[in-house]
Structures are given as structure tokens and as C-alpha cells.
Image (cartoon, grey):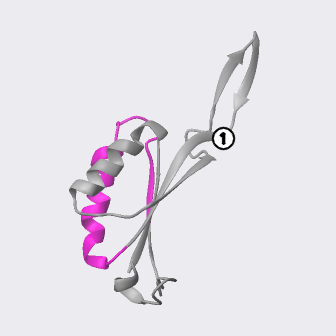
Amino acid sequence: MKKIEAIIKPFKLEEVKDALQESGIEGMTVSEVKGFGRQKGHTEIYRGSEYTVDFLPKIKVELVLPEDKVPTAVAAIIKAAKTGKIGDGKIFVSQVEEAIRIRTEERGDSAV
């Protein structure tokens, strides 16, 4: 099993969700997060005063999938989230040792 964490622009969430569903991938966790990478924030003017916004709002989508579905999920996320502009986000893929469904105590792929 693998865990996919995708950091995307907030307005791309629906497109990413739809793309994953069309690819036959269901189940995800979504969090509102803040951060910055190379973008390093930006300056804004509010009531005549300029201030720096260091942490930009982003969405983190998390999925745990069998290894064979990972390339499909990654491709769907990239296609749906990409604008071609700075700040499109990142995708991280990592190994998951164990998954357990609390209700039934199923383990492994069947728990996902």
C-alpha cells in the first residue's frame, strides 16, 4: 500500500476529486493547510498598509491505495491540479506498512 499526499490550490479541489472518481478511486481525506515553497508568499495591501502573506492557503488531499492504483491516481491529480503557474503544489508518495479498519478489524488492502 502507498499513501499519496497532494498539496494543491484550493480552487482545484473539485476538479481533483472528480478526476479521481472518474479513475475509479474513492475515499480521501482533505485538510485545509497553509504553507509556501519556492513561491515564498506575496505582499498585499489592506486598508492602505502593505503586509506580507508568508503562508498561502492550500488543500492537502490524502489517499491510501494499493500500489497498482498509484500511477493512475498520480496522473489524475496532476492532470486536474495543473495550471502551469507557480504554486500548483506537490505530490508525495510514501509506503504504508499497515492499514486497519476499526469497525471490522480488517487489515491491509481490504481495510482501505
Q: Nearer the viewer, residue 35 or 10?
A: 10
Quarter residue 95 falls in? bottom left
Q: Is residue 102 above or below residue 93?
A: below
Q: Residue 23 vs residue 94: left or right?
A: left
Q: Tell me where residue 85 appears, x and y as whole percent.
A: 40, 34
Residue carrying label 1: 55
Q: Residue 7 vs residue 68: left or right?
A: right
Q: Tell me where residue 84 appears, x and y as whole percent.
A: 35, 37
User: Could you tell me which residue is drawn at 42 percent across and 62 percent down?
Assistant: 28
User: Could you tell me which residue is drawn at 34 percent across and 48 percent down?
Assistant: 16
Residue stretch rendered in magenta on the structure: 65-92
Q: Is residue 47 above or below residue 74?
A: above
User: Could you tell me which residue is drawn at 60 percent across and 49 percent down?
Assistant: 33
Q: Nearer the viewer, residue 50 or 66?
A: 66
- Where is the N terminus found, in terms of image quarters? bottom left
In the displayed image of the protein, which residue is found farthest to the front?
Answer: 103
